[in-house]
Image (cartoon, rainbow, N blue to C red):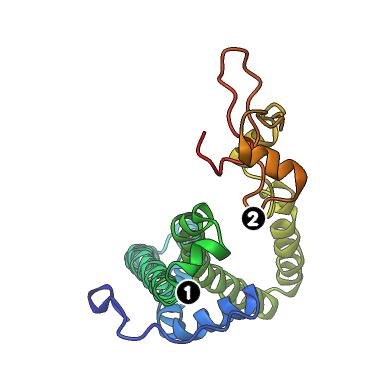
Amino acid sequence: MQIRDLPYSDPGDPDVRSGPRFLLWLGRNQIRGQLKSMSWGLLHQCSIAGLPLTVGFAVQAVVDRSGGRLALAGGLIAVLGVLIAVGDTMLHRTAVTNWITAAARVQQLLARKTAELGSALTRRVAAGEVVAVSTGDVEKIGWFVEALSRFAAAAAALVIICVGLVLYLPSLGVLVALAMPLLALAVLPLLPGPPGAPTSSARRQARRPNWRRTPWPGCACCAVSAARSCSWGATGVPRRRSARPRCAVRRCGR
């Protein structure tokens, strides 16, 4: 799927039983783009990993005073540099394409469901929640899809390098195979909290001063709500001396 092919003629029927199931469904629909991005990322990572080997060849050629081997090592370094540039460029291109296509698919699903629910949507979910999903959550899903191929390419390159080192120099290969996962796990405490953590706006809302719920004696709606539960619910009135008392039920509009 390319960007020029958007929007989708049919975004599909998502599996919304849970978040992981939805991401799995989305990944199955993005499998071709993920494989392309992973392939370019694997080329990029393996080319970077080959630089120390070619530099070692060059140093050994200088020690042995071999001009031919030094030229060969220089040519290999130049080829690896070209592969790194091409792999990095195409990796970014395919990863961003995956991000855009995944976000477009989710946006189309949201638009289709919004059109199906119609006015019933705002009775089920607050309008602010709908806006937050269409602006923030869709972007985060796109980031996840983009980062997934990069992570898969880096993990595959690590396995290839560790296998090569174990075959070439077992002691160094085992050391790298044990140290790299530990280094990856060491950064976990530095990562931000889960998405469910309170946002800055939620914290500001929690720090707001208390609101009094004193009904206005001259309002018929307040008198009715005091006698029985009102379906409209009570809303608070700020504690301001200069503010005119307002209806605690807001049904009458006063």
| Picture coordinates of residue 215, whole percent (x, y) | 69, 32
Query: Cα distance, mark 2 to mark 1?
Result: 30 Å
Q: Position of residue 107 (x, y in %)?
A: 40, 69
The residue lying at 72 percent from left, 69 percent from top is: 177
Label 1 environment density (alpha carbons within 10 Å; few <14, some 14–19, many ≥20): many
Task: Say left or right for 41 vs 67.
Answer: right
Q: Which one is in front, 180 or 101?
A: 101
The mark nearer the N terminus, 2 or 1, is 1
The circle drawn on residue 42 is 1
Front in this rendered view, residue 111 or 106: 111
Give the left or right position of residue 193, taking residue 114 as reference.
Answer: right
Q: As drawn, which residue projects farthest toward the top?
A: 242
**Location of residue 112 in the rendering, given as x and y in whole percent from the top left corner:** 40, 76
User: Element type at marker 2?
Assistant: loop
Residue 248 to residue 239: above or below: below
Q: Amino acid at mark 1?
A: Leu
Tell me how many marks there are: 2
Q: At label 2, which amino acid type do we have?
A: Pro
Residue 24 percent coordinates (x, y): 58, 81
Q: State left or right for residue 212 relative to residue 104.
A: right
Is 149 situated left or right of 169 in this image?
A: left
- Give the residue number, with chain letter if any, for mark 2: 195
